[in-house]
Amino acid sequence: MQIHLKFTISMALLAFTHAHTAVTSELSWPQSEIGASRSGFSESGIEELDQAMKEIVKNQDVAGMVWMLAKDGNVATFESTGFARIDDQVPMQKDTLFRIYSMTKPVTGVALMILHEQGLWKFDDPVSKFIPEFKNLQVMASFDEQKTNLVPMNREPTMRELLNHSAGFGYGLRGDDPVNDAFRQEQVLASSDLTELVDKVAQIPLLSQPGEQWYYSIAVDIQGYIVQKLTGMSYGEFLEKHIFEPLKMTDTSFFVKQEDEPRFAEVHNWDSERDRLVQRPHRQDRPSYLDPSRLESGGGGLVSSIHDYARFLQMLVNEGSLEEAEILTPESVRIMRTNSLRDELDIRGGRDRPGQAGVGFGVDFAVIYDPELANSPQGPGTYYWAGAAGTWFWIDPSKDMFWIGMIQAQGQRRPGAADMRGVVNELVYNSLRN
């Protein structure tokens, strides 16, 4: 499969004229779909998939969408529909730019694995080896309205636990407890840079003893800081040099260039009073996406296009390489997509709550280790993640296949809105030819 992708890319891909000139000049994969039958799907199945996505947009479940499905290096479908900006009636295009939020996290995982291959850190290293400020963190043992009981750590969290969200850190995105309250009060995610972010985190207790529970956390922003510490480069510089430039990801950055602003999609939500989708106002507590000084958040800061992120995903499908770019070894990619949570712990699980059955976590990805338990049609080892504004992807390594969908939606949804991700999974796997 990798040899086929690297040396026999169809001339149809090279002949496609992409709307974005930087992409056109590179003639880089993927620039057009090859078609359903050649990529291992039924024509009728892909037609049904495309129609379902268009219907979701037509029903105002989302304002617009771009989607891509690829298998064995061949693109079965690559389509767009709807609006990137409803107010201005700007159509969604294949080169539209999106806030990918937490789909930044797998990029950070790849960055750290590049440094792992260089021998700069090990999975069993304590996190404090790279961040001494975390040497003596305290742990929240219990709390009530009057008091928070803190205890010392039983042991320090390891890099493995930092990478699979079981180190014990909070986040502040949710949670009605003193730890997450502190993340919000200290405005950790609004820090001016990663050094300030880490300094703030060092003053906040852990939610649990290391390894005891899975909690979606600030861990990946901490990982970005560790990249800076190990390399002496800013986090953004490292990504640009070692991932974006080699993969020709010309649209991916922590901010939007002024000339690219017309391609930048707005975020929408359902307005029940007006009975329609509306554009959400921009946040005033963070720098604008047009500001180059924005926090280089390894956990959620990147802007990208579907074309760019598809190249990143195909690199992972190929176990570390794409065309002439060699980003990781196959062994590193296999480590990333392997569940590393302890046996009795699943994603979203802890001491006093069950996790999501059949789903664990690797290096900045969720991993379906048992599709039957997870009630999923996807193959064993499928790994995935998503962003806060609805972007989502998955890779099924058993079939050398990935899906990516890009939308910009937060907040209230239309009553009765479709389960997009469930619809996609069902239609994709029903469309596979035996």
Image (cartoon, rainbow, N blue to C red):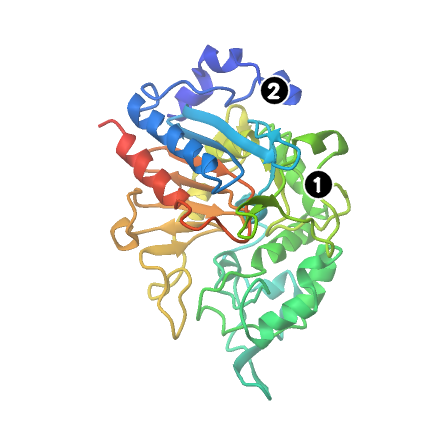
Residue at the image position 57 percent from the left and 30 percent from the top: 92
Residue position marked by numbered label 2 in the rendering: 19
Residue 47 placement (x, y as % from top left): 35, 25
What type is the residue that disc 2 sits on?
Ala
Question: How far, Cα to Cα, is label 1 from label 2?
Answer: 21 Å
**Image quadrant of residue 143?**
bottom right
Relative to residue 94, is residue 301 depicted above or below? below
Kindly state the secondary structure of the residue where label 1 is placed.
Answer: loop
Kindly state the secondary structure of the residue where label 2 is placed.
Answer: loop
In front of the other: 240 or 15: 15
Residue 104 placement (x, y as % from top left): 57, 46
What type is the residue that disc 1 sits on?
Phe
Relative to residue 4, is residue 319 depicted above or below? below
In front of the other: 177 or 263: 263
Label annotation for residue 79 = none
In this image, 79 relative to 178: left or right?
left
Residue at the image position 64 percent from the left and 72 percent from the top: 182
| Residue 115 visible here | no
N-terminal label among 1 and 2 = 2
Residue at the image position 75 percent from the left and 29 percent from the top: 259
Label annotation for residue 255 = 1
Label 2 Cα crowd, 10 Å radius (few <14 / some 14-19 / many 20+): few
**Image quadrant of residue 63?**
top right
Relative to residue 75, is residue 139 depicted above or below? below
Residue at the image position 54 percent from the left and 71 percent from the top: 156
Q: Quadrant of the N terminus?
A: top left
Q: Quadrant of the C terminus?
A: top left
Relative to residue 78, is residue 117 depicted above or below? below
